[in-house]
């Protein structure tokens, strides 16, 4: 009986955290969609934008991990300096995010993203991760 109550509490906490995560991701998606719209992004509804970014986030995640880890590893090994590592991170992360967005754009008929809108938002997302390199300098 006690174990069942604990499991229900864990599920409630997990569900609440999931809802908060989706809410934050939705807000970021709507803001990002607004920025992309300036550069030709078109969509049928706010739900389309949110779904577009949720799927793209999931698709881009593995590549973004590599894009972040690779320059850091080269920096730690002394193969490149901090500035080169940061520029390499920006390029790799932008490409990784663009790749995810392009794939979702191709398969999702309710949105239409221009290449420039994808590149600009991907670069903005990459700059948002710049704090990961602050301690490595």
Image: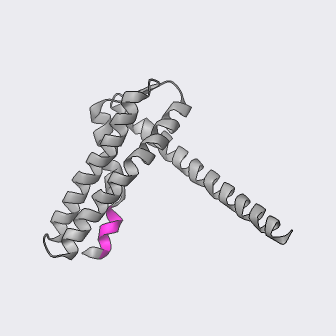
Residue at 51% over, 37% down: 51
How many labels sit on residues? 0
Segment colored magenta: 130-135
Q: Main secondary structure of the magenta part?
A: helix
Residue at 31% over, 75% down: 135
Q: Position of residue 26 (x, y in %)?
A: 54, 44
Residue 38: quadrant of the picture: top left
> Does residue 113 sit above or below 86 in this rendering?
above
Q: Nearer the viewer, residue 22 or 63?
A: 63
> Does residue 78 sit above or below 15 in this rendering?
below
Q: Nearer the viewer, residue 82 or 69?
A: 69
Q: Is residue 119 left or right of residue 107?
A: left
Residue at 19% over, 59% down: 87
Q: Which corner quadrant holds the N terminus?
A: bottom right
Residue at 32% over, 35% down: 117
Residue 32: quadrant of the picture: top left
Q: Which corner quadrant holds the C terminus?
A: bottom left
Q: Is residue 58 magenta?
A: no
Q: Position of residue 70 (x, y in %)?
A: 25, 63
Q: Position of residue 111 (x, y in %)?
A: 43, 27
Q: Nearer the viewer, residue 33 or 4?
A: 4
């Amino acid at each position: 009986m006690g174990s069942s109550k604990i499991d229900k509490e864990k599920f409630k906490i997990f569900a609440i955290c999931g809802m908060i995560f989706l809410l934050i991701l939705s807000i970021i998606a709507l803001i990002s969609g607004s920025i992309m719209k300036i550069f030709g992004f078109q969509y049928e509804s706010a739900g389309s934008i949110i779904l577009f970014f949720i799927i793209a986030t999931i698709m881009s995640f593995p590549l973004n991990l590599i894009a972040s880890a690779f320059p850091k590893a080269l920096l730690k090994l002394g193969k490149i300096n901090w500035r080169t590592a940061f520029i390499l991170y920006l390029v790799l992360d932008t490409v990784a995010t663009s790749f995810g967005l392009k794939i979702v754009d191709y398969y999702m008929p309710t949105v239409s993203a221009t290449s420039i809108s994808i590149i600009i938002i991907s670069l903005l997302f990459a700059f948002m991760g710049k704090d990961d390199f602050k301690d490595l300098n």
